[in-house]
Amino acid sequence: MDLEDAAVAGKDTKPKPTDRELVAKLVDQARAEGLELVGENGLLGRLTKLVLESALEGEITDHLGYDKHDPAGHGSGNSRNGKRSKTVLTDVGPVELSVPRDRDGSFEPKIVAKRQRRLSGVDEMVISLAAKGLTTGEISAHLAEVYGAEVSKQTISTITDKVLEGMAEWQNRPLDPVYPVIFIDAIHVKLRDGQVANRPIYVALAVTVDGERDILGLWAGDGGEGAKFWLHVLTEIKNRGVGDVLMMVCDGLKGLPQAIEQVWPRTVVQTCIVHLLRASFRYAGRQHWDAIAKALRPVYTAPTEAAALERFMEFAEAWGGRYPAIVKLWEDAWAEFVPFLSFDVEIRRVICSTNAIESVNARIRRAVKARGHFPNEQAALKCVYMAIMSLDPTGKGRKRWITRWKAALNAFAITFDGRMTPTTR
């Protein structure tokens, strides 16, 4: 089947067919001739070849200033000089193109540049697959199986390295002057630095005054999660323009409230209830976890701080003899536990835990799980960055965030009167 002839024939038909009718005609003709729609020499591949070669012919015509076989080209000083064969990887697989050349070698095609072996859509697909956690070997196998294209693991690594420049720009971008809430947490990845060891990747996720999610950055730690490194992270965030944070939600890491106070003295520190419960279970026998969770629930669901203290005293009386370390844990964390109790139940749900950042961390963990371990810090950060950049591709999550946070932000505006100033993006 000659696709070019079919297209021309379609144009000559009267009344003039629609694009959909023309495509349907091509598909029907391909099926009648036993031509596959996809795969090597399939209809999509041949259409892609036709479109790209037509575009290249248009480019060289613009470059020379006259059409093929046009007498105006005689004596112009430059002319067409045959074609060269070139295979490029496209979204529908490898496509062999005939690229026109000019006599003096000055033609520089744009749609398929010299030495270009992949169309941009392929790079985007590779980055998307990497963001979902596929290794370079798995991506290479996927391209070979689905598109019949042989792409080396080194080439795939080179493609994903393109995100590093964007990552550096993103990591150093200016931030908003005020955030109602920032959630901070760390996930651990395995790095092969002499020997395989766990290393923390620090994540800061903010809610803007408009109710949108904004991941402020990623930082690779040098060992166990510590308040000293968090001080470094928070100072960097402040230096990027954040003058005020109304509330910081974090785990119960020792020294972290003091680090936050040093950077933003007026920030309310809220301990994540989920982290507090997990820490409690570490001191208890597994057979008692359900009973302890049931006994602690009245504490963090109490209507007021005074009621929460009464329920906690009841818990201490019932369980303090068996597990005094749990009682001490809650006593030490009490000042950072109670701030959310001043809000109503609906608002508590969005600020009393790091669930907002835990969902992001879950996506990150899926991306890093398949890797086993990373050769270096940069490789780990690249993987995590691609994972978070692939969040919410449809934009529906952004709408849910704004709806979810509307009531909370209204309460924040009243509670922190004058401090929550809208930002312009």
Image (tube, rainbow, N blue to C red):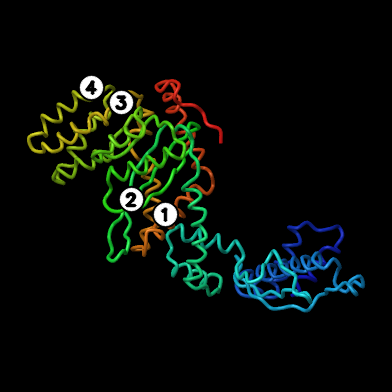
Mark before the other along the chain sequence, 2 or 1:
2
Q: Is residue 391 above or below residue 339?
A: below
Mark before the other along the chain sequence, 3 or 1:
3
Instruction: State the separation of the CA atoms marked 3 and 1.
Output: 34 Å
Mark before the other along the chain sequence, 1 or 4:
4
What element does badge 1 sit on?
Answer: helix
Disc 1 residue type (three-letter): Val
Say which residue label 1 marks: 384
Say which residue label 4 marks: 307
Displayed quadrant of residue 282: top left
Badge nearest the viewer, 4 or 3: 3
Disc 3 residue type (three-letter): Leu
Q: Position of residue 301 (x, y in %)?
A: 28, 28
What element does badge 4 sit on?
Answer: helix
* Circle on res. 341: 3
Q: Is residue 84 left or right of residue 319?
A: right
Q: Is residue 79 above or below residue 164?
A: below
What element does badge 3 sit on?
Answer: helix
Displayed quadrant of residue 38: bottom right
Task: Tell me the crowding category of disc 2: few under 14, some 14 to 19, or many 20 or more residues within 10 angstroms, Cα based.
Answer: some
Badge nearest the viewer, 3 or 1: 1
The residue depicted at 37 percent of the width and 58 percent of the height is 377
The residue depicted at 79 percent of the width and 77 percent of the height is 103
Instruction: State the separation of the CA atoms marked 2 and 4.
Output: 34 Å
